């Protein structure tokens, strides 16, 4: 009888420890795979871009799903809001600034494919706009990056494209 109690006790302790370990693993996995949002990706990129410039008033922040905010935002003629789950943009406030950051999440892989194609049209228009206008701004546009991580896309026109791209990639992962 003593052996049966000992074995039962060992089994009970083993199940308890195994259950706790499984619960800890589930919590850890849940934390590790916590989905990130386009807004959470965009925020550190904005902070970095503004820190380079040093003035908040040089930029306009837009929610791409708010038609009132994007009425005069030229990339929207290429981007289909039906493909966008969430998206934000930061653009230069003055007509002499080519700075443009866009981070968005597509609804699915096909949506992201279409949005990436649209970003290529945006860059073509930026090249046309800035080609004969202001040389240093045109240089920035020529170094533009379109980066894709899963269903997220970043469109980066900045003097600091490498730093912003790194933030995007590190935040998504």
Image (cartoon, rainbow, N blue to C red):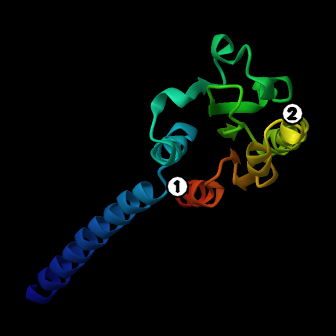
- Residue 85 in the image: above or below residue 159: above
- Residue 91 in the image: above or below residue 35: above
Residue at 81% across / 29% down in the picture?
79
In the picture, measured across the screen, residue 141 lies left or right of residue 6, that is right
Secondary structure of the residue carrying numbered label 1:
helix
Q: Residue furthest bottom?
A: 3
Q: Is residue 75 visible?
A: yes
Q: Is residue 36 visible?
A: no
Label whose residue precedes the other's in the sequence (2 or 1) = 2
Q: Quadrant of the N terminus?
A: bottom left
Q: Quadrant of the C terminus?
A: bottom right
Numbered disc in front, either 2 or 1: 2
Give the spatial CA distance, label 2 vs label 1: 31 Å
Residue 52: % across, % down? 50, 48
Mark carried by residue 21: none
Mark carried by residue 129: 2
Residue 157: % across, % down? 70, 45
Question: In which quarter of the view is residue 172 placed?
Answer: bottom right
- Residue 81 in the image: above or below residue 111: above
Q: Nearer the viewer, residue 89 or 31?
A: 89
Secondary structure of the residue carrying numbered label 2:
helix
Residue 76: % across, % down? 79, 24
Mark 1 burial class by Cα count in 10 Å: few <14, some 14-19, many 20+? some
Question: In which quarter of the view is residue 61 placed?
Answer: top right
Residue at 21% across / 72% down in the picture?
12
In the picture, measured across the screen, residue 140 lies left or right of residue 55, that is right
Mark 2 burial class by Cα count in 10 Å: few <14, some 14-19, many 20+? some
**Residue that label 1 marks:** 171
């Amino acid at each position: 009888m003593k052996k049966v109690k000992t074995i039962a006790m060992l089994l009970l302790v083993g199940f308890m420890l195994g259950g706790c370990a499984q619960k800890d693993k589930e919590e850890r996995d849940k934390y590790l795979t916590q989905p990130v949002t386009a807004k959470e990706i965009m925020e550190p990129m904005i902070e970095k871009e503004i820190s380079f410039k040093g003035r908040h008033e040089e930029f306009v922040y837009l929610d791409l799903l708010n038609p009132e905010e994007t009425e005069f935002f030229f990339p929207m003629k290429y981007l289909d809001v039906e493909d966008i789950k969430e998206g934000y943009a930061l653009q230069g406030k003055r007509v002499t600034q080519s700075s443009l950051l866009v981070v968005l999440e597509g609804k699915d892989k096909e949506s992201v494919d279409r949005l990436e194609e649209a970003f290529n049209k945006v860059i073509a228009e930026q090249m046309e706009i800035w080609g004969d206008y202001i040389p240093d701004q045109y240089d920035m546009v020529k170094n533009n990056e379109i980066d894709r991580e899963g269903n997220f896309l970043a469109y980066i026109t900045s003097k600091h494209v490498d730093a912003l791209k790194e933030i995007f990639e590190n935040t998504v992962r």
